Amino acid sequence: MSIGENYQDIYRKLDGHKYGGMFKFSQPVLIVRDPELIKNILVKDFTSFHDNDVHVNIDTDPMFGRNPFVLRGERWKITRSQLNPAFTAAKLKPLFPLVLEVCQELTDYIEKNAHTGEFETKELCARFTTNVVATCAFGIHGNAIWNPESEFRRMGRELIEPGFLQNLKFTTILLMPFIADIFKLRFVTTTLEDFFRRVVKEVAMQREQKNVNRADYLQYLINLKNKAAESSATDNGHDFASQKNIFSDDDVVAQAITFFGDGFETSSTALSFSLYALATNPDIQEKVREEVESVLKKHGGELTFDSIQEMTYLDMVFSEVLRMYPPAMFLPRQCTKPFKLETPSGASFEVEAGTPVVIPLYALHYDPQHFHDPLIFDPERFSEENKKNLHKYVYLPFGNGPRICLGSRFAMMQVKAGIAAIISNFELSRTKRTPVPFIPDPNHFLLAAKGGLWLQMKKLKRKDI
């Protein structure tokens, strides 16, 4: 089973209980089921569950060790505050024309290759999101859509592609970090690190020589580094916590890698399952298409940042996609300060500092107590009226609280743009190889369909928009 299904199995065995436990080798792990308790862990009592349960030695893996997902304590707080401003709507809106250029490239590619009969949608979407990230983060054409062996696409595979040795390495890092330290195992390989160091250095040098200040993510990181250099020139403090603006060359490269990994992989998963859901629910597909075409007509046929925000039914569909197919199937937290839980008898149980805590998203999203007929794809669950009846902490595709996914707005922007571009140009349908129902692939840490997501995409006869 996939890791999400494993936690779902434990979740179901704990039916009727607010929480329960399992063992990670010899270490007790708290599994949380109750929405109010989840709310406490993520928000109300955040200081008691401040860190994610992922241990990475920054000396062994200096790039992944700077990823906000694994950073801890004060260092996480400072890095998060430095990066937050880069993901506001005001910062993302200027990037939308770049996303639109990649959407055009994607539709051109699909049209030219539609005669093949079908596409493996996850790979196609990964090539799309790779190009989006390459242009929005680095100002580089990733060339991944037309060339699956392009350098950026190969680096994407190097980072996340599953395989026996890769899975063994990831499992060791996640479950036995002390062994990972001994063997100096890294999420971000030296090949990846060297590639992104070279890209960052070349782009930064070109911009400095030509006096170019491009409004993309890399420029934001370069500006942070320059600001830190100016600050350190007048500050003799060496303690990290005392230097609120510290941001080095390593930080620039590390956060560029973070943006690349998070931006292409989870978004390609969300986009591919969105297309799968539309292909297997043709009535919903047609309704989305009608809304997209109506909004485009209102905006003179142009897909814009603002027009995407007007597509309310598309938003409902995407919300339901993230319920049924959440890319991350669980949230791994760690107790950072002793925390008392109420027991059924009215006594209390103390969760010790250092205890891993699992919030099983996949299980919550498929719990019939929270979602009626959870195996049915129903976007109406997320209508304005129905959302009022949904407990906020049983639907957590991006997490919640201070550690909510930093790039959620960027992810939604590129995925919705991709859906709108495809759905207004092509009709999606199943093929003999389309998995219905889909089976989660146990070889992936993120949600993936066993055997791939094969779909047919036929060119629509153009309507006047």
Image (spheres, helix red, strand yellow):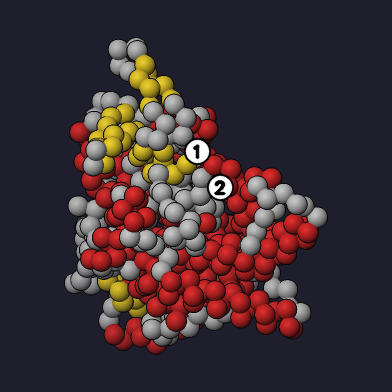
Residue at image position (29%, 65%) is 166
* Direction from residue 36 to residue 76 in the image, left or right: right
Q: Amino acid at mark 1?
A: His
x and y percent of residue 463 in the render? 49, 76
From mark 1 to mark 2, how far is it between C-alphas?
Answer: 9 Å
Residue 96 appears in view:
no
| As drawn, 23 above or below 107 | above
Q: Residues at badges 1 and 2 in contact (C-beta under 8 Å)? A: yes
Secondary structure, mark 1, is loop
- Picture quadrant of residue 247: bottom right
x and y percent of residue 155 in the render? 42, 75
- Badge 1 crowding class, 10 Å Cα cut-off, few under 14, some 14 to 19, many 20 or more, is many
Query: In the rendering, which numbered label is found on residue 50?
Result: 1
**Closest to the observer: 206 or 294?**
206
Q: Considering the image in quadrants, where does the C terminus appear?
A: bottom right
x and y percent of residue 138 in the render? 59, 74
| As drawn, 41 above or below 71 | above
Residue at image position (73%, 83%) is 209
- Badge 2 crowding class, 10 Å Cα cut-off, few under 14, some 14 to 19, many 20 or more, is some
Query: In the rendering, which numbered label is found on residue 76?
Result: 2
x and y percent of residue 398 in the render? 46, 49
| As drawn, 436 above or below 77 | below
**Closest to the observer: 142 or 369?**
142
Secondary structure, mark 2, is helix
- Picture quadrant of residue 136: bottom right
Q: Amino acid at mark 2?
A: Trp
